[in-house]
Image (cartoon, rainbow, N blue to C red):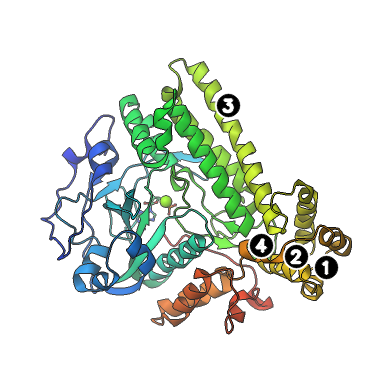
Amino acid sequence: MLRGGERAYAAGVSIASPIVPDRDIRLDNRFASELPELGVAWKAQEPVEARLLAVDEDVAAEVGLDPAWLRTGDGVRLLLGVDVPAGATPVAQAYSGHQFGRYSPRLGDGRALLLGELTGADGRLLDLHLKGSGRTPFARGGDGLAAVGPMLREYVVSRAMAALGIPTTRALAVVATGRAVRRETLLPGAVLARVAASHLRVGSFQYARSIDDTELLRRLADHAIARHHPTAAGEAEPYAALLRGVVEAQASLIAKWMLVGFVHGVMNTDNMTISGETIDYGPCAFLDVYDPATVYSSIDEGGRYAFGNQPVVAQWNLARLAEAMLPLLHEDEQQAVTVAQDLLDGFRVAFAAAWSAGLRAKLGRAGDEQADPLGDELLTLLQTGRVDLTSGFRALAHAARGDTAPARRLFSGADGFEAWLTRWLALAPDADAMDRVNPLYIPRNHLVEEALAAATGGDLGPLHELVAAVSAPYEPRPGRERYAAPAPEDFGTYRTFCGT
Ligand code: AMP
Ligand code: MG
């Protein structure tokens, strides 16, 4: 067990002598060496029979990995974490977290490993991280494994998010392990390899604070500043500037989620990054019909992480970050609280600005404040008319070009739509600009389910088709009509599962 001040490596397990892949791949161990208290050196589990299911060549290129090499036996062994370059120090990270509001002082990577850091095309460090790589000292009752379905869900949804311009961790590859994973039924196991700006979370700061080690907390904050908010280093109050940076990054991120109807589903503080990237695609899903009360996750019984609650929850999580950072904000606790409160108040302002700017753009009136009341009214119309969010905005662009029939059809259940349409059209919305921000292809729930079920049964065709559709979300392509269509009537109430 990790305790305050204890160097985790001292008690950690030494990894077997690493085998150097036959390429010049360098994995830094910046996190492991700068923050040893926040990791336990660990080794990934050997597969039974490895099979590469998917590799994202764009992500590979961004981190200087040759996709053809990744497909070789050696490449796959790197993707599974069983062979790592010399000098790499894979670690399971320690962190705390509020899960559905309840604090767990010690969560950590129960089934994940940070293999080390790669260097991106722009020279920035990027984590190479695995999920489903076997039990770690943080596994508690868990088996340390992941199933093919949930790992491919992260693969396709994170790819879609990136294509939508939403900050996210990126899936590099999914490798089936040949190991059966016991959930409700026996499922094929897999490891997801992902690349991220880092895996520092709100929960990382909570952990450092909970072991009451202010020196560690400061080192963690310095590490976060160097990697994510480097301009904070030059400010008079670098830690306040870091907190401000995280608040602003998260406000912008959540606004982007809300504008496309993304429901994360499990916004625990261990699943909220310091970088401002979306992380940990568990029970996530996209809205079909617009309704702020929408909850997909089967375990979110109280609706804490309902679509419309996400901004409030994000601010709540950031308050937990601010609490953890109090010793860095001012030596006098009361004054530290005042500083923190001030910075947290910035969330609402930054979120409102990002949201309004985004909604104006979706309405083809970028930068026009006059569009704001129309935006608010449209949300009511979408909700009362039970209109599919994604199709609704695309139909409005058709209306802006003169063809109002699709919009009239979709909004037929929304009282007051005609009057709204007349007022909005009078502003001369820019239809082409709308089509550049309102996606046509998103990972619709029924398509994701179809693709994952097929993949679990061994057929990767539907998954690759779906990935191809959501990778270019704005441009209509012939033959892809079904990827733009709302769920069929008989799809019913959608439920998602964490897959843990
Ligand atoms: P999540 O909400 O999926 O991000 O996970 C919450 C916590 O549970 C993290 O500490 C995970 O590492 C851990 N966890 C989830 N699933 C498993 C599993 N199958 N085996 C071990 N630990 C797990
Ligand atoms: Mg998590």
| Mark sitting on residue 433 | 4
Q: Are marks 1 and 2 in contact (CB under 8 Å)?
A: yes
Q: Residue at x 13, y 57 (%)?
A: 18
Q: Picture quarter containing residue 225?
A: top left
Q: Picture quarter containing residue 36?
A: top left
N-terminal label among 1 and 2: 2
Question: Along the line of sight, which residue is nearer the eye, 238 or 52?
Answer: 238
Q: Quadrant of the N terminus?
A: top left
Q: Amino acid at mark 1?
A: Gly
Q: Badge 1: how crowded within 10 Å, few (<14), some, or many (20+)? A: some
Q: Residue at x 75, y 59 (%)?
A: 383
Q: Amino acid at mark 4?
A: Ala
| Mark sitting on residue 413 | 1
- Residue for badge 2: 386
- How much space separates mark 1 and mark 4, taking CA atoms? 27 Å
Does residue 9 sit above or below 241 in this rendering? Answer: below
Per the image, label 2 sits on a secondary structure element best described as loop
Per the image, label 1 sits on a secondary structure element best described as loop
Q: How many marks?
A: 4
